[in-house]
Amino acid sequence: MHIVNARLRQRSELFELKIDNGVFTAIETQTGPIEASADQLDAGGKLACAPFIEPHIHLDAALTAGEPAWNESGTLFEGIERWGERKPMLSEADIRQRVIKTLNLLIGNGVQFVRTHADTSDPSLVGLKTLCALRDEFKDKIDIQVVAFPQDGLLSYPGGDRLMEEALEIGADAVGGIPHFEYTRELGVASMKRVIELAMKYDRLVDVHCDEIDDPNSRFLEVLACEALFNDLGARVTASHTVAMHSYDNAYCSKLFRLLKQSNINFIACPTESIHLQGRFDTYPKRRGVTRVKELDAAGINVCFAEDSIFDPWYSLGNGKLLRTLDFGLHICQMMGYKDFSKALSLVTDNSARTLNIEDRYGIEVGKPASFNLLEGEDDYSVLRNQGDVLLSVRHGETIMQREPAKIVTPPWIG
């Protein structure tokens, strides 16, 4: 494959991209637009960008909203109750058909890497087993990391610790946790220590649903960060949600950020879901309930955006379009300056790659796998502002998705 007249992020020139055996073999600057030959792909000045990454989603629960009942209160906790009612209905066939439909939706929107959580608060572990099997089946189209996630608590759920070890032995890629949902603070702290212990024992990544609550006294993030720091695991550890940080006072955050910076852990924010679920116990003023994305980014701490859910008990919308999540997130987090816009795509690409620990095989660079999207726009700002479509998705040099740009047909009565 040979692409001409392509734009690259943070660059004003046009580029030629040469691909051989699924690898970028040359990336060369053009002096100006050139006419593409029959064996070349003309990018037409559009942006070639590293593939989108969905770093936090629950594929085992996707497409189950309203089954058997809707989350009427819109709270996180009713969502957990509704999911508890849906779990007895799970089967391999049920999960497979929903997950495959959702993966195809993501692939169609330029996503080539996914980190999904699989509920281990289920003695059958059918969700985790099915997701691990689909991970291997879909590896040519999309990379999937499976997090063993104890939805009802690692230590509070009967047999939760045993089920976690079983999930890791089956082949889960990462250890999850939910300390704020454990019965007591002491159990929450102990769960964080146990998560790190298991990650070291099985040589796995860590991704914890951490402080996903408006309670300013929920401070398990400091425990997770300390354990990551003391065990030198920071780059392999991710704190998802951390929405309680929105309720922390600034004096405490000043101290906390020093630890977070030293720990080198990653952060995932799910802006559309969090602004929907959080602040439900407020009248007015009403909290946004999203972690301090702008401040984390300014401090040089790695943070990225995710959808979290697609039509499930916690969030009844979602369409696999990360540009929508990015647009909402920048608004919600008040990151609306030009500098924010000019690097916006990093929140759904490069930063997510660092979170998933895939930087060695990600990005438009000579010698790396030739995987990229062609976006309808010429830079981060124009793609974001116009919510441009993903026109082409190439994985290891092979086209896995292509669409024609939308066209407006002018009515005959308009001159």
Image (cartoon, helix red, strand yellow):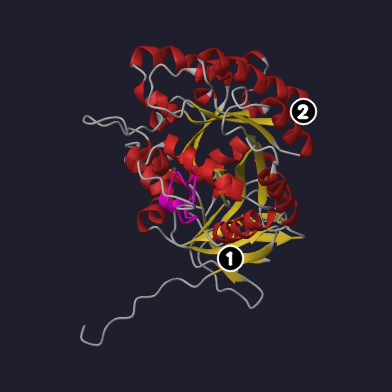
Residue 372 sits above or below residue 185 on the image:
below
**Nearer the viewer's eye, disc 1 or disc 2?**
2
Locate residue 110, reporting x and y percent: 55, 57
The disc placed on residue 172 is none
Image point 66% across, 43% down: which residue? 145
Q: Residue type at mark 2?
A: Tyr
Toward the bottom, the furthest residue is 412
Residue 127 visible to the viewer: yes
> What secondary structure is marked by label 1?
strand
Along the line of sight, the residue nearer the viewer: 94 or 235: 94
The mark that comes first in sequence, 1 or 2, is: 1
**Left or right placement of residue 304 versus residue 207 in this view:** left
Local packing at callout 1 (Cα closer than 10 Å; few below 14, some 14-19, many 20+) is many
The disc placed on residue 202 is 2
Locate residue 50, reporting x and y percent: 58, 51
Identify the magenta region: 306-324
The disc placed on residue 4 is 1
Residue 158 sits above or below residue 26 on the image:
above
**Left or right placement of residue 117 versus residue 241 in this view:** right
**Left or right placement of residue 74 versus residue 311 in this view:** left
Local packing at callout 2 (Cα closer than 10 Å; few below 14, some 14-19, many 20+) is some
Residue 368 visible to the viewer: no
Residue 159 painted magenta: no
Work out which quarter of the rendered image holds the C terminus and state it: bottom left
Locate residue 103, reporting x and y percent: 60, 57
Rendered image quadrant of residue 387: bottom left
Q: Residue type at mark 1?
A: Val
Image point 44% across, 58% down: which residue? 378
Q: Distance between the residues labelled 1 and 2?
A: 45 Å
Locate residue 9, reporting x and y percent: 50, 49
> What secondary structure is marked by label 2?
helix
**Left or right placement of residue 145 versus residue 277 in this view:** right
